[in-house]
Image: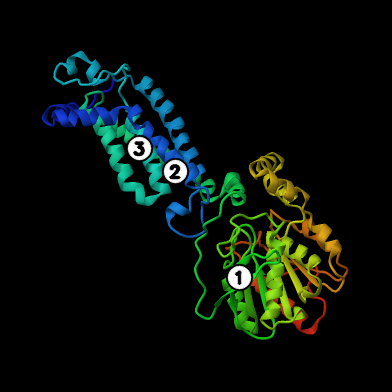
Amino acid sequence: MINWPVWDTELLYAVNQDLSHPMLTRAMLFITEADNWIPLILIGAFLLLFGGCNLPRFSGSSFQRRNPRAVLVGLLVCIAVSDPAVYQLKKDVGRIRPCRDDDVAVMLDCRLYSPGRLSFPSSHAANSASLAVFISCCYPPLSVPAAVLAFLVGFSRVYLAVHYPLDVIAGWLFGSLVGLCVFLLFRRPLQSIGLVGFANRFRYRQKVVETAPSSEWRLCSWTSHDGLPVTGWHLPGGRTLFIFVHGLGGNCTSRVPLAEELHRRYGWAVLLVPLRGDSGHPVSVTSGGVLEPHDILGALAFAGELGYSAGKCILYGVSMGGSAALKACALGGDIVPGLLVIHGAYARFFSSARHRLGGLRAGLLRLLIPRTASADLGLFDARLYAALSPPPLRVVYISGERDATCPLIHGEEIMAHFPDHSVMILKGETHPGFGNACSPELLAAFEAIRAAHLENTPVQGDGIQL
């Protein structure tokens, strides 16, 4: 038998009796009824699922950096853990609700009938606190309204005499612990776009937050090979033009730091190419490398208009951009660049997906991607375009030692078609992304690439770790 503190009952009487008011009673009855929150829950779920079709983003506010689908699953897990755990605690403790205890209820205004007899801790308080803490951790700007709602739910249980204050306090503490643990468990999924988010790249334009380059850069326009107007960035420089082509996870300006460092070191001019789905391109969604070669060929032709001969151009493509650049070179004819640098490109899209995700999740991704795009990606094979590339094409393949998406073996399948190819392995590096866009290892690789480009010789670095 637990000796409950006297202040617990006295505070219950004070809240229930001294604060009694008809309008407050109506408000508390509304708040405590879970069914009344269903419309708000449905609206929130709708906003998370459909309003977040192009989230998370790599930069921007905290609302833009969370996977909305992971947030929704996390909220469900909070309830799935909190509610049954509290029910078991109630059975173990066995405290009777004040409104069901005849000795206590006689002194109370019992405004709400509760079918359950057990009181400690409060399920309403625990569930609302778990949701409030999880939401606050995910979206800090919502912490105050979430805390207020959780407080009102707990307060309503005391005001309506279905719980003692200590029941609610214990529920808040337990629920807060559950919400925090679920957030820690979901930290990685919350920061990942997930399968649905990745597939959404083929359905919706991704509103990636971009920062315009410095005033040295010039905004310029040209036409893709298939006649579409695109807008990219040009940094004037010397006689060598460095052309950057981004991947599925990047955008036109995602390699500005690398470009500016190469410009500072070597005086290279730079051209940043927007692909389909980028904000500078009229086509809203990507094709995964199937149609992007049209954008690259348009940029190579524009390089000639800027006064750069094909032999003085270095075409650098990362991930999907590397595979698309290889296809562009196979179809480029007279505008093939002097050097093609492929960084972490895939030979076959779904083969790389299976390597990264496993067979089951890769199969699910294939189903989530729109049917036409999925069929085109299934037919796209960078090895075919490697075999069709003109003999003079000089190619360097850069691979991260720890690349789990496009491992070195996939690059070797592509490079097997080039007799004078070079492979450079970046020690400790993963798949190319924002985090390693300008790493010391990559800059060391470009030092070797620059020397070979100047001397028109093979790049020294075949299979060497940098």
Decide: is 269 above or below 17.
below
Quadrant location, the C terminus: bottom right
The image quadrant of residue 301 is: bottom right
Q: Nearer the viewer, residue 312 or 179?
A: 312
Position of residue 411 measured from the top left corner of the image (x, y, whole percent): 78, 60
Secondary element at tag 2 = helix
Dot 3 surroundings within 10 Å: few (below 14), some, or many (20 or more)?
many
The alpha-carbon separation of the residues under discs 3 and 2 comes to 21 Å
**Which circle's residue, 3 or 1, is located before the other in the chain?**
3
Q: Residue at x 81, y 65 (%)?
A: 330
Q: Nearer the viewer, residue 145 or 206?
A: 206
Secondary element at tag 3 = helix
Decide: is 210 above or below 166.
below
Describe residue 180's horizontal placement relative to residue 413 as left or right.
left
Q: Residue at x 53, y 81 (%)?
A: 216
- Contact, mark 3 vs mark 2 (Cβ under 8 Å): no
The image quadrant of residue 23 is: top left
Label of residue 438 in the image: 1
Position of residue 51 measured from the top left corner of the image (x, y, whole percent): 47, 46
The alpha-carbon separation of the residues under discs 3 and 1 comes to 43 Å
Residue at mark 3 = 129
Three-letter amino acid code of the residue under disc 3:
Ala
- Contact, mark 3 vs mark 1 (Cβ under 8 Å): no
The alpha-carbon separation of the residues under discs 1 and 2 comes to 36 Å
Label of residue 168 in the image: none
Q: Residue at x 68, y 77 (%)?
A: 303
Q: Nearer the viewer, residue 335 or 320?
A: 335
Dot 2 surroundings within 10 Å: few (below 14), some, or many (20 or more)?
few
Three-letter amino acid code of the residue under disc 2:
Leu
Residue at mark 2 = 47
Describe residue 19's horizontal placement relative to residue 230 as left or right.
left
Can residue 445 be seen by looking at this rendering?
no
